[in-house]
Image (tube, rainbow, N blue to C red):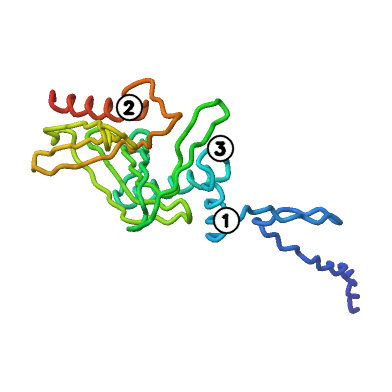
Amino acid sequence: MKEKKEKTQKLPKEKKVKENKIDFDDEPVEKGRKMKAPKVEKQKSPEKREKVTAKYFKKFSGRSLDTYDEMVQADYAKAIERAHQLSNIQKYDYSAPVLITVPDAFRHGDRVNYRLDQKSDGTYSLMYDQALVYVLFFGKTSLFYYQANVDHRNGHITADVAGEFHYSDVIHMETVLKYDNVDKPKYITLDLEIGLVDSIIIPFHLRNHRIHQAYHLPTLLTDKESQILGILKKKVRESRSL
């Protein structure tokens, strides 16, 4: 007799489930809720910036303006970034940078505009729309220096100069404090000249203050000037004793 074949029960077909592709860069979004894109602060256009600066310097004195101060600080940050690239240095190569500014025309024939700002604590600060900017980076064995002309009216930077020298190569330092005119002074300047072993002289203009009615310095040097001269002379003298 022929054996009857047992019927095998067919398993139900598995339903295909569509896989949702997940992009791990995307964040989940709640249903029915629209996500607002983050606001990006737009930088002031050169035309708008020039208008702000021109209006700011219409008066010789007045309260300080945060908007203008932020633009100036952004210019300084850009100058430090350019100094890093030209000198090929990083933040760990030096201690905190020291920045000095003196009024200086951006182009030949330009006129520098001044403004006397009154701060919230009652003190005054002299501002200008064009400047010669120095940045000093005090390293362990060397001084890295940078200078450039900055036009705060539009944020342009030109005439970049970057250099460095070993403290042990310094053989002479001369500091000169003087008025532009002894009888009727309008400016008081402070210059520092550094002489190196190869007879090269490196000048730094540490001060070019315009004298006005509210101008008064309680000491011979400002805090920043004392800081620069103190650090530099200390490092040069220490290098000679090694």
Q: Give 219 or 58, whichever is nearer the viewer.
A: 58
User: How dense is the environment of label 2, judged by Cα within 10 Å: few (below 14), some, or many (20 and up)?
Assistant: few
Name above or below for residue 120 compared with residue 83: above
In percent of width and height, residue 148 lies at: 33, 50
Disc 3 vs disc 1: Cβ atoms closer than 8 Å? no
Q: Quadrant of the C terminus?
A: top left
Identify the residue shown where x is 28% and y is 27%: 231
Mark whose residue sits in front, 3 or 1: 3
> In this picture, is 5 found above or below 116?
below
Identify the amino acid type marked 3: Gly
Residue under label 2? 227
| Position of residue 128 measured from the top left corner of the image (x, y, whole percent) | 44, 44
Q: Is residue 64 above or below residue 240?
A: below
The residue at which mark 3 appears reads as: 62
Residue 77 visible in rendering: no
Q: What is the CA distance from the residue labelled 3 to the residue labelled 1?
A: 23 Å
Residue displayed at 67% across by 59% down? 23
Front: mark 2 or 3: 3
Q: Nearer the viewer, residue 146 or 61?
A: 61
Residue lying furthest bottom:
2
Of marks 2 and 1, which one's residue comes earlier in the chain? Answer: 1
Tag count in the figure?
Answer: 3
Residue 163 in the image, given as x and y percentages of width and height:
24, 46
229 displayed left or right of 99: left
Query: Which residue is label 1 attached to?
Result: 44
Q: Residue at x 21, y 31 (%)?
A: 175
**Residue 13: horizontal and vertical position, in percent?**
85, 69
